[in-house]
Structures are given as C-alpha cells and as structure tokens.
Amino acid sequence: MPVTDDDAIRDVLGMNSIAVVGCSTTAGKAAHEIPAYLQRHGYTIHPVNPYADTVLGEPAVDSLGDVEAEIDLVNVFRPSEEVAGIVEETLARHDDEGDIKAIWLQLGITDADALADAEVAGLTTIQDRCMKVEHQRLIAD
C-alpha cells in the first residue's frame, strides 16, 4: 500500500534527485510550479517532457530511460490512466540502473494496481498527495 504516515513521507522527501514526468513549461500550472518550488528548496529536478527542450533551466528528456543522472524519486504529473505505463518504465529503469527508490503520484493521481507492482519491486509509493504541500507541512521552516 502507498505510504501515508509522516515518517515514511519524510523519508521520501529526503530523496534529492527527482525525475518529474509531465513537468510543464507553462508557469501557473501545478506541473511547473511544484517542481520549481522543489528546485528552489534544493532538489535536483530532471524534467521528463517530450515536447520541451528545457524546463526550469534543465534539459528535458523524452522518457525516464533518457535521464542520464541517477534518480531517487519519480514524481508523476500525468493522468491516472497513464500511471501503469509510467510505472512499467520506472520498473524497467529500476531493474537496469537500480537507482529509483520511490514513486510519488501528485494530488488527484492514483493507480493502486500499478503501485502494487512497484511495491513488489521494492519501491516506496505515495499517491494522491502534493509533494509541495507535504514538504511545507513536514520539512520547510
């Protein structure tokens, strides 16, 4: 089951390198503003957006497999119906690289079956929560 307790969420918030699937170039959209907030708070953001060259001053890539850096966490800003495919891509990278430790589905995004597969593979999962809100609640001063 996706984690819900504060200690587990705090652990995930302690992960620094974040691939943001669906990271937007459009200011004002949650998929832009939340990664920008995280970047301002010291997280390394790796935008995954096949329609952009750069997002938040970082090079954007087409897929998780194209992120050359080590990734601790995959943060998802895509519709729930796309989660299963994103989890498959995450697990493929996890098997090949072994670097991804967690998947976070933003507020309003859920897929219990896909996240169950991720948990079987050893990943921590969070769904239907805003990473910015949780950071402000548990970490930020």
Image (cartoon, rainbow, N blue to C red):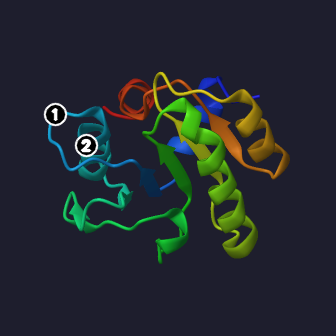
Question: Which quadrant holds residue 45?
Answer: bottom left
Q: At 43% from the left edge and 34% from the top edge, which residue is drawn?
A: 131
Can you identify the residue that label 2 sits on? 32
Q: Mark 2 Cα within 10 Å, few/some/many (few <14, many 20+)? A: many
**Callout 1 amino acid:** Gly
Depth check: 22 or 42 in front? 22
Contact between labelled residues 2 and 1, with CB atoms less than 8 Å apart: yes
**Residue 111 spot, x, y in % from top left:** 66, 30
The picture quadrant where one finds residue 126 is top right
Q: Residue furthest right?
A: 120
Does residue 11 appear anywhere in the picture?
A: no
Q: On screen, 1 above or below 56?
A: above
45 lies left or right of 106:
left
Instruction: Identify the residue under disc 1.
Output: 28
Kind of residue at disc 2: His
Q: Is residue 76 left or right of residue 22?
A: right
